[in-house]
């Protein structure tokens, strides 16, 4: 059979540990036999980031701006232990943080539902998509450890030199201090991305902040959402973050929950675990310029990788990484008008879900499925089983 042709390369961002192993397996078994895969390859594995002083991360984000679609493997965000393990020159920043600050935009995370795995919140019948603002707040903060008494002030010096000062706290002893920011431009593009996505996928949009407490910071988010809604859109829902959390637990699902950066980070982990597994969650960054970056929502699965290095068998779930590829290929197909490429993405996703629904799955899913006749497969065999399903 002739391979499916591509016209524009995908930006391929390789990563670390167990997900790097899965990455290669997915390409070898599920993509290269069927597609004349065109990618511009960037190795975001920690060793190569260290060798290039992290320039490769910046280059990959710029390539994404150029081509429009990227697919990213999970990567290590270095900490003290990684400094030693990889003999790093510096504690390089989170690649996701670097990429997001270049692309701006909003991260949409949606659980992948399969028959036989029911969310532990029983009333959730449809997916809840989390829209996470991917710029600013605590992720771009400045912190001071205060060692003793003193006055902390917030100072803004306008371009014309005018100073605005606000007292933060008169410290009588040691403590901590944090400064953060966001911009109207980024909040506006976040709001637009959410409204567009809601209209596109015909779902309701929920948005919640803590504007009763944060009367300027969080209130600005609320005001911008309100203004864009009133001027440009119809359906929307605004409430307090506390109320949203309570309502989400009672809801049926089938809506988009727009969250500030930090809320989106933690709530997406809660939603994905409640739907079954971190490995059953897709994630896409949509930038205001119309650029898309697809990834799995989970990390590099370090614990499994160490087992793999010891020669032990692993049963790591590759579904989210497969869906990152299919999401990117489908988007490339839509942009380049290649219906065969879109059809291939649909077919691979269906084969993945059919394989699980037929009882063949990785251990994380086997532990929570309601199916009774289950075969637990190792990392490689699960991917091979999907290939068999696809070729049926
Ligand atoms: P993780 O890689 O998401 O794994 C945490 C645990 O969740 C695993 O130990 C495993 O549980 C389970 N799990 C996650 N993905 C799985 C999969 N595909 N199949 C089966 N089980 C899965 O988080 P982490 O261990 O905290 O972080 C490891 C590294 O990933 C860190 O260096 C971190 O910086 C990085 N990270 C990267 C990203 C990203 O690039 N987007 C996101 C988060 C973290 P069991 O061990 O119980 O089987
Ligand atoms: Mg998180």
Image (cartoon, rainbow, N blue to C red):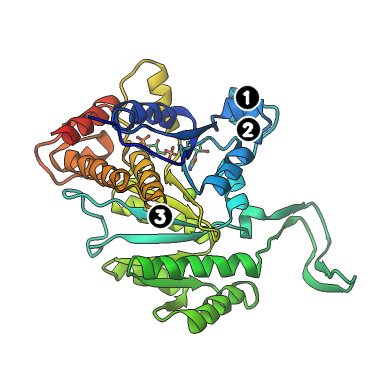
Q: Which label belongs to residue 109?
A: 3
Q: Nearer the viewer, mark 3 or mark 1?
A: 3
Q: Where is residue 271 drawn, in percent x and y?
A: 36, 56
Badge 2 element: helix
Q: Mark 2–mark 1 contact, CB under 8 Å?
A: yes
Per the model, the C-alpha gap separating discs 2 and 1 is 7 Å
- Label 2 CB, ligand 1: below 8 Å? no
Residue designated by label 1: 84
Per the model, the C-alpha gap separating discs 3 and 1 is 33 Å
Q: Quadrant of ligand 1?
A: top left
Q: Where is residue 9 drawn, in percent x and y?
A: 47, 39
Where residue 48 sits, quadrant-wise, is top right
In the picture, measured across the screen, residue 302 lies left or right of residue 274, that is: right
Residue designated by label 2: 80
In the picture, measured across the screen, residue 150 lies left or right of residue 61, that is: right
For marks 3 and 1 on the same chain, the one whose residue lies earlier in the sequence? 1
Q: Nearer the viewer, residue 321 or 260?
A: 321
* Residue found farthest to the bottom: 230
Q: In the image, what residue occupies the spot 62% across and 60% down?
A: 137
Relative vertical location of residue 323 with respect to residue 239 in this rendering, above or below = above
Q: Which label belongs to residue 227?
A: none
């Amino acid at each position: 059979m002739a391979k499916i042709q591509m016209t524009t390369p995908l930006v391929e961002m390789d990563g670390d540990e167990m997900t790097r192993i899965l990455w290669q397996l997915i390409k070898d078994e599920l993509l290269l036999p069927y597609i004349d895969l065109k990618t511009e390859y960037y190795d975001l594995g920690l060793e190569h980031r260290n060798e290039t002083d992290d320039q490769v991360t910046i280059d990959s984000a710029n390539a994404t701006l150029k081509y429009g679609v990227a697919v990213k493997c999970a990567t290590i965000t270095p900490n003290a232990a990684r400094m030693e393990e990889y003999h790093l020159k510096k504690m390089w920043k989170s690649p996701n943080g670097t990429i997001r600050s270049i692309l701006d935009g909003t991260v949409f995370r949606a659980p992948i539902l399969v028959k036989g795995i029911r969310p532990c919140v029983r009333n959730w019948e449809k997916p809840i998509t989390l829209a996470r603002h991917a710029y600013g707040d605590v992720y771009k903060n400045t912190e001071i450890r205060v060692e003793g008494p003193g006055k902390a002030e917030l100072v803004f010096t306008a371009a014309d030199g005018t100073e605005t000062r606000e007292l933060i706290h008169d410290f009588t002893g040691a403590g901590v201090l944090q400064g953060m920011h966001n911009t109207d431009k980024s909040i506006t593009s976040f709001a637009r991305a959410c409204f567009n996505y809601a209209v596109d996928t015909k779902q309701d949009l929920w948005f919640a902040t803590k504007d009763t407490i944060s009367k300027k910071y969080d209130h600005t988010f609320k005001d911008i959402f309100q203004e864009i809604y009133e001027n440009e859109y119809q359906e929307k829902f605004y409430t307090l973050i506390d109320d949203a959390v309570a309502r989400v637990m009672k809801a049926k699902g089938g809506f988009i929950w727009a969250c500030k950066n930090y809320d989106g980070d933690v709530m997406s982990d809660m939603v994905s675990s409640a739907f079954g597994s971190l490995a059953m969650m897709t994630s896409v960054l949509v930038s205001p310029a119309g650029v898309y970056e697809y990834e799995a929502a989970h990390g590099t699965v370090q614990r499994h990788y160490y087992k793999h290095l010891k020669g032990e068998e692993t049963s790591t779930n590759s579904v989210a990484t497969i869906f990152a590829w299919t999401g990117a290929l489908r988007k490339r197909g839509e942009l380049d008008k290649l219906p065969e490429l879109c059809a291939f993405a649909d077919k691979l996703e269906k084969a993945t879900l059919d394989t699980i629904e037929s009882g063949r799955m990785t251990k994380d899913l086997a532990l929570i499925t309601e199916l009774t006749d289950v075969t637990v497969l190792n990392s490689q065999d699960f991917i091979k089983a999907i290939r068999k399903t696809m070729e049926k």
